[in-house]
Amino acid sequence: MGDMDLQEDEVRKMRKEDIQNAITKKEAQTLQNLDLNSLRDLDEKTPPPAPEKMSDVDVLTLALAKSRSRAALAEAKTAVAQSEKSELDYRYTVLQLYRKYGLSDADAISEDGAIVRGGATQARSQ
């Protein structure tokens, strides 16, 4: 055998060892997740059972539902922010009109545009 054959043989041995180490590690992780009764049912000849796993379709369905939930939450947050901005715009407009017409906090503006001097106190007392 030449040097190349020895190197290839050594690489194969290292790969086989890496695979066995990975299998041992996965089996140890699986054993950590088993309940006590399941552990007692095992012996050294029986490999640990494979963990239960959902089908790929169900995993994708769950991911899609989560994505839709996040999108709906983002839309709701945007709607709340737009509503708050609209409320602030309204209040700012009212403030500008109060300043323009020299109104005080005791005055009121009706929906038809009428200015009621002292109207805010009348509405509060009712």
Image (cartoon, rainbow, N blue to C red):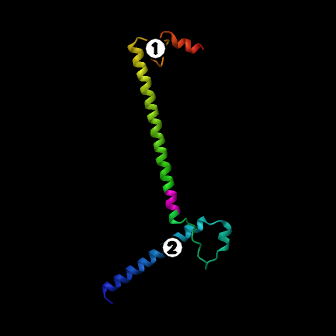
Q: Is residue 60 magenta?
A: yes
As drawn, the residue found furthest toward the front would be 112
Q: Where is residue 49 in the image (x, y as percent from the top left)?
A: 59, 72
User: Quarter holding the N terminus?
Assistant: bottom left
In the rendered structure, which amino acid carries the disc numbered 1?
Ala
User: Is residue 111 shown above or below 6?
Assistant: above
Q: Does the magenta stretch include residue 18?
A: no
Q: Residue at x 46, y 33 (%)?
A: 83
For the residue labelled by badge 1, is the local secondary structure a helix, a strand or a loop?
Answer: loop
Q: Residue at x 34, y 82 (%)?
A: 7
Q: Where is residue 56 in the image (x, y as percent from the top left)?
A: 50, 65
Q: Residue at x 59, y 65 (%)?
A: 32
Q: Which of marks 2 and 1 is nearer the N terminus?
A: 2
For the residue labelled by badge 2, is the local secondary structure a helix, a strand or a loop?
Answer: helix
Which residues, given as a range, are shown in magenta?
58-63
Q: In which quarter of the image is residue 78?
A: top left
**Picture disc at residue 40:** none
Q: Residue at x 48, y 9 (%)?
A: 117
Mark 1, other Cα within 10 Å: few <14 / some 14–19 / many ≥20: few
- Disc 2/disc 1 C-alpha distance (Å): 83 Å
User: Is residue 43 shown above or below 88?
Assistant: below
In the rendered structure, which amino acid carries the disc numbered 2?
Ile
